Amino acid sequence: QRQQCLLENATKVLAITDSIKAKFQPICPKEITAIYDGVDVNEYLLPVRRVLENKNISILMTGRIAPGKGQLDSIKAVEKLFNEGYKNLSLKIVGGIGDEEYYRELKKYVSDKKLEFVDFLEFTNDLKVIREKSDIGLTCSTFEALGRVTIENMLSSMLAIGTNTAGTSEIITDYKTGFLYKPGDYEELAEKILLAINNRDLSNSIIRNAYYEAQERFDNK
């Protein structure tokens, strides 16, 4: 009731993405304007570079560890590729634990399957150090209002791969500024990772597009 009162008396109602606007417009008494949330570009900006050039390919997933964030999908996708003979892949999962039961499930899965290429890191003082050594950044969420992690990956000169849903699909243009896949479909995610590895010139062209577009679209200034 309080929120409805605020909406009715507001001069302007803003949503941080078109997806959020579409979700709330039917119950909002005012026309909603979508304006993307900004980020401090300089905080995440790394020099543009070529990735996927080394023998070992480093994949990074950052963000709160919870079922809706899709960490299990990332593990299964890399596991699938590893079992198909791509032994030079590593996956680093960095983030605070939002769901203890889910975190235990992830750790048990990795332990039971002996997936030594998966590392968990709950906290780091400087994510830039990890990002500058990573090739691919994943966003596997079923629904992101915006998806700052995706923007951060783009600004860090990493190849962004994310789910074709909500805010993530507004940030990434498939084959232009990243790759998209169906939420929950870890096999398609594995295909997109493999596509990136096997088409390095395309991937690096996409990274450059994303690097400059993210600075233009999402700078908080």
Image: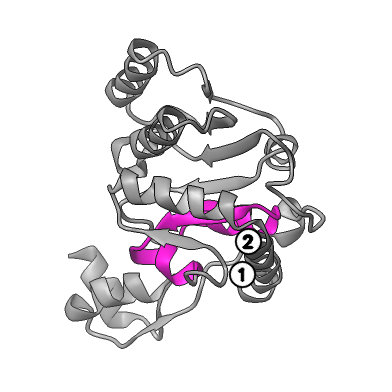
Q: Quadrant of the C terminus?
A: bottom right
Asked if marks 1 and 2 touch (Cβ < 8 Å), the reply is: yes
* Residue 5 inside the magenta-drawn segment: no
Measured as percent of width and height from the top left, residue 140 is found at 39, 48
Three-letter code for the amino acid on which mark 2 is drawn: Val
Which stretch is magenta? 146-172
Instruction: State left or right for residue 130 relative to residue 195.
Output: right
User: What secondary structure is found at the residue carrying circle 2?
Assistant: loop
> Secondary structure beneath disc 1?
helix
Instruction: Please say if 204 is above or below 11.
Output: above
- The CA span between labels 1 and 2 is 6 Å
Examine the rendering and report whether any part of residue 140 can be seen. Answer: no
The image position of residue 75, as x and y in percent, is 40, 32
Q: Which residue is mark 2?
A: 39
Could you say which is closer to the camera, residue 172 or residue 15? 172
> Going from the N terminus, do you reach mark 1 or mark 2 first?
2
Depth check: give the residue in front, 133 or 62: 133
The residue lying at 77 percent from left, 58 percent from top is 42
Residue drawn at x 18%, y 79% is 26
Q: What label sits on residue 218 in the rendered view?
A: 1
Reply above or below: 134 against 161: above
Point out residue 126 in the picture as x, y percentages from the top left corner. Answer: 72, 34
Residue found at x 70% / y 55% = 157
Query: Which picture quadrant has residue 169?
Result: bottom left
Q: Amino acid at mark 1?
A: Phe
